Amino acid sequence: MKIAQLICAPGRTGFFFDDQLAIKNGVEHDGFTYKGVPETPGFSALRQAGEAVSVLLILDDGEIAFGDCAAVQYSGAGGRDRLFLAKEFIPILNRVVKPHLEGMELTSFSELAKEIDQLKNPETGELLHTAIRYGVTQAILDAVAKARKKLMVEVIAEEYGLEPLDFPVPIFSQSGDERYINTDKMIIKGVDVLPHGLMNNVKEKLGFRGEKLLAYVKWLKKRIEDLKPRNDYQPVIHLDVYGTIGMAFAHEPEQIISYLELLAQTVAPFHLRVEGPVDMGSREAQIRMMQTLTQLLDEKGSQIELVADEWCNTLEDIKLFAQARAGHMIQIKTPDLGGINNTIEAILYCKAHGVGAYLGGTCNETDRSAQICTHIAMATGPDQILAKPGMGMDEGYMIVFNEMSRILALRKSRRM
């Protein structure tokens, strides 16, 4: 079967683009947005509407496969590609990707995805934006699955020598700034890993000595105990702090560790994961500090898990962090890796090297990218998957939970 035509459609994502640099530097809230001047190149406002591009592949039998190009909420930060705007990138898709794919035979997903992931814009000589590679490879996976009349999870498993899971992957929900109301929703629905918390500002959210986050986790523990949907409910507490702990404690490892231990004691008996405790401003410095913090916790016999995020964007980055054990778990931030073939390889690499694999992404994705990531999760078996898109909690959790449930039900019916 061949690809007959490629069509692009502009779309919206489940959230917004935010200027992380300006927000971390202390801008003020203004309703749902922020007051101030953008500091990251490409931004016209501190918060602006998220954009996506749906790539639709018309197959020569009339079937339609599609994936969504999308970029992370904090585009342009931590070494990531610049802002992804539909009006700027649809012409590139039409000039570069469309003639490359139309007429192509649908053979191996992994080979075709690698080809697209390495495709360069002849006008600049550079690789295509990660969002383009992300969305086009999603569409290719869907197209190959339709050509073979299989589920996407089955295509991945077949090509990478895997056995699809027959049980669900733990789902991690994020609260956004509504860290109280949305956490209530998570507890009532029995979410496996919660609440994220969006602790991205020292003054407003963490506290200059961490006192605001400490107060929040005290509330969180009590709330779980008050609202737990069943007696054996034992969620993992996963907090994303965007480097603010390092900022509050002058990047002194022993002070950071002492504070992390205080958080863990406060939230016990629930298991604690802390994502992005520091942001050191470069990949090399980030690896060194995360490696130091991880070693200090391990030497103490601590059960706290550190999650690498900042400066760990590409497949190459993930391999370097895993090799250095710069974190107990690595977030595989799917749009940042470009082609979804890289996401698959990143999960398998982490698992092979004894590092936790968190199939993440961003609130600024779409329903389609979340569904396809769920197929990746059910083929590769990461330790957790992010409920996405959006920050409203309900919608992203529903999309990932329901797609996972459909996969399990269909696979079970075929074994009967």
Image (tube, helix red, strand yellow):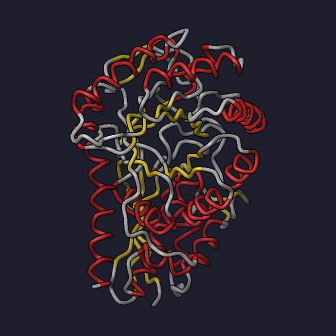
Q: Position of residue 85 (x, y in %)?
A: 48, 47
Quarter occupied by the N terminus: bottom left
Q: Position of residue 300 (x, y in %)?
A: 67, 29
Number of numbered discs present?
Answer: 0
Q: Is residue 239 above or below residue 60?
A: above
Looking at the image, residue 306 sits to the left or right of residue 11; the answer is right
The quarter of the picture where residue 82 lies is top right
The quarter of the picture where residue 345 lies is bottom right
Looking at the image, residue 291 sits to the left or right of residue 240; the answer is right
Q: Position of residue 73 (x, y in %)?
A: 47, 39
**Residue visible at 62% across and 37% down?**
310
Answer whether residue 100 is visible to the viewer in this image. no
**Residue visible at 68% across and 60% down?**
123
Quarter occupied by the C terminus: bottom left
Front-lying residue, 161 or 146: 161
Front-lying residue, 71 or 270: 270
**Residue visible at 71% across and 44% down?**
325
Q: Position of residue 414 (x, y in %)?
A: 30, 84
Answer whether residue 216 is visible to the viewer in this image. yes
Front-lying residue, 119 or 259: 259
Looking at the image, residue 146 sits to the left or right of residue 343; the answer is left
